[in-house]
Image (cartoon, rainbow, N blue to C red):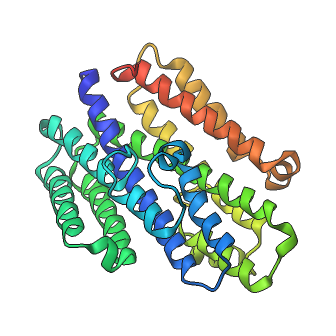
Amino acid sequence: MLSRTADHLFWLSRYIERAENTARMLDIAYQTSLQPQSADQSEQTWRSLVSISELNGLYGGKYSAINGRNVMEFMVADEGNLSSIFNCLRAARENARAVRGALTTEVWETMNQTWLEFRRLLREGALTRDPSQLFEWVKYRSHLSRGVTVGTMLQDEAFHFIRIGSFLERADNTARLLDVKFYRQEQSQGEHDAARDFYYWSAVLRSVSGFEIYRKVYSNVIQPDKVAELLILRPDMPRSLSHCVTRMQANLKRVANAQSGETLRRVGRLEAELAFGRIDEILADGLHPFLDGFLAEVAELGVRISEDFLVPSA
């Protein structure tokens, strides 16, 4: 397969996954904002979303205050924010258009219709009228895109590059979410309230579709260390770091070439650390250093995948 074709496939899946993850985090922040809370707590909720995507500087250059309306506009519809849902869906569609021959008709039509419908919804004021409904629509379209890809495409190199992009992006986003949420919890340790803690960690779990899974696995009250274990080490949790790295390695093996040996070694080492890790050891050494190291490793893997298979990034 041509490296440019692989590059388009890799990035179209990353952009779709990024749009979905952004919608998930915004929806939880919006639902949380409807709960009784102080102005400082509300601002911190919205500030954390901007921090997750490392967009503090860009946001600060456009808005003087952090609030729900500004952050949602910035993260959903701002054409100047390359990580906004608007730009992610546009980029996914453009990458799909560039490699229509490598996709099934169903995959292309799903990508194209998603972009066209999203623009129509924004023009009709869906973000202002009912943000939560718009976020659910974005998640649904991402699920539909993923399902059509798995259900209609030949599982050849094109399919594997799409899956590699999806799992790499998902691992990155889950780690960022955990890092920001646990840091915020540490900052407010002197303000514990049982009811608020329940809603807080419930929101974290719901943002990764993990609330019902947590109840099934642990059958207990929601505890931060168990949330971390579920989202880091459980290989059967679809959005956990362990699951994402395992699936990424499996797909990388299917497209391995003469120069990808070191990339495979590094992703294999990362998989082993997660497979044999224990949450008490991770927490004892510090969750933030662990997640910081994981994010650095994921970023390095993205660079190496580009160098091994794709059009190298500048």
Residue 153 picture location, percent across and down: 22, 48
Q: Residue at x 88, y 50 (%)?
A: 284
Res. 280 image quadrant: bottom right
Tell how many labels.
0
Above/below status of 31 relative to 149: below
| 254 displayed left or right of 57 | left
Residue 201 picture location, percent across and down: 67, 72
Q: Residue at x 35, y 23 (%)?
A: 310
Residue nearest the viewer, comparing 59 with 205: 59
Q: Is residue 233 visible?
A: no
| 34 displayed left or right of 147 | right
Residue 273 picture location, percent across and down: 71, 40
Q: Is residue 104 visible?
A: yes
| 54 displayed left or right of 86 | right
Residue 5 picture location, percent across and down: 23, 28
Residue nearest the viewer, comparing 50 with 149: 50
Residue nearest the viewer, comparing 290 with 199: 199
Residue nearest the viewer, comparing 147 with 133: 133
Q: Residue at x 83, y 52 (%)?
A: 283
Res. 265 image quadrant: top right
